[in-house]
Image (cartoon, rainbow, N blue to C red):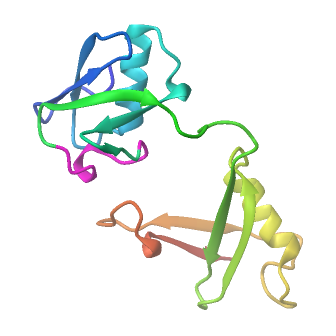
Amino acid sequence: MAAPAGGGGSAVSVLAPNGRRHTVKVTPSTVLLQVLEDTCRRQDFNPCEYDLKFQRSVLDLSLQWRFANLPNNAKLEMVPASRSREGPENMVRVALQLDDGSRLQDSFCSGQTLWELLSHFAQTSPWTGSPWTGSLWCATLTWRSGCRPGQRSCLTSSLS
């Protein structure tokens, strides 16, 4: 099942490439990728090869249902993916803003872990005497409540 049991009574209908419709129950916290994966599992398709489209717009599969601005009982369509979502060839740009307001940024492969990113920033930091230059450092990342996906200031860091 794509969504945890309980709460909300929303559902979405997904049209698969084989012409069959699949109804998926969703909660406000259901991620759209879960809807696609559930439909692909039931219809025997590879979710990496498809996107979801509502009317004329391809949807951002990383959004939760509540932030996707979709109506209840929306009719979605599976369409061939315009670009791959998996694999080490996808590059992403990551910026880490520190408590003092300084910002570290670099490009990474999408398959790298958060720990690898933090380790990279620790090794390449230009500041001497900062917590980043020591051999032992710790980063605590905190998600601020009430933030929406895509907001810049929701993830904060503190170093010790």
Q: Residue at x 74, y 58 (%)?
A: 108
Residue occupying the far front of the picture: 56
The magenta stretch spans residue 156:
no
> Is 19 or 115 nearer to us in this picture?
19
Give the left or right position of residue 156, taking residue 7 as reference.
right
Quadrant of residue 5 within the rendered picture: top left
Which quarter of the rendered picture does the C terminus lie within? bottom right
The magenta stretch spans residue 62:
yes
Which quarter of the rendered picture does the N terminus lie within? top left
Give the left or right position of residue 89, taking residue 146 as reference.
right
Give the magenta range.
Answer: 61-70
The percent position of residue 80, horizontal first and vertical second, equals: 48, 29
> Is 118 or 137 nearer to us in this picture?
118
Quadrant of residue 49 within the rendered picture: top right
The percent position of residue 72, horizontal first and vertical second, equals: 11, 37
The percent position of residue 85, horizontal first and vertical second, equals: 59, 39
Q: Residue at x 42, y 64 (%)?
A: 150
